[in-house]
Image (cartoon, rainbow, N blue to C red):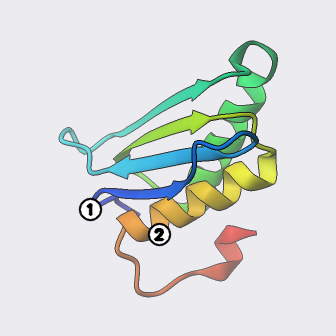
Amino acid sequence: MKIVKEALAGTLESSDLLVKVAPSPTDTLEVMVQSEVIRQFGEQINKVVRETLEKMGVTAGQILVDDKGALDCAIRARLQAAVLRGADCNKIEWSRLS
């Protein structure tokens, strides 16, 4: 799956996150994570982001995650929503989103 247009999901409220996706000019996958709790949970946040992108089959795009202390389930949900919007996906493979 490739990101073909810019898309957003989430908010910058406490305990939430904002995910921005955009097409990659180099046709690679670039992930950037910013978080207020990066020192304590940065490894886990990155793991959840990478696993979610892998499950969805995302191979190219720019992904920016601006975390404000969200739980793993919120990270997954926001990332999935942004990717599906940005990939302009008409057919959703629901089994990949679990």
Q: Position of residue 40 (x, y in %)?
A: 81, 16
**To which quarter of the image does residue 41 belong?**
top right
37 relative to 6, above or below? above
**How dense is the environment of label 2, judged by Cα within 10 Å: few (below 14), some, or many (20 and up)?**
some
23 relative to 56, above or below? above
Of the residues shown, which amino acid type is indicated by label 1?
A: Val
**Residue found at the far bottom of this picture:** 91
- Earlier along the polypeptide chain: callout 1 or callout 2? 1
Label total for image: 2
Q: Residue at x 54, y 46 (%)?
A: 18
Q: Position of residue 16 (x, y in %)?
A: 69, 46
Residue wearing tag 1: 4
Of the residues shown, which amino acid type is indicated by label 2?
A: Leu
**How dense is the environment of label 1, judged by Cα within 10 Å: few (below 14), some, or many (20 and up)?**
some
Q: Residue at x 35, y 60 (%)?
A: 2
> Does residue 4 appear to the left or right of 48 in the view shown?
left
> Does residue 70 appear to the left or right of 94 in the view shown?
right
**To which quarter of the image does residue 28 belong?**
top left
95 relative to 43, above or below? below
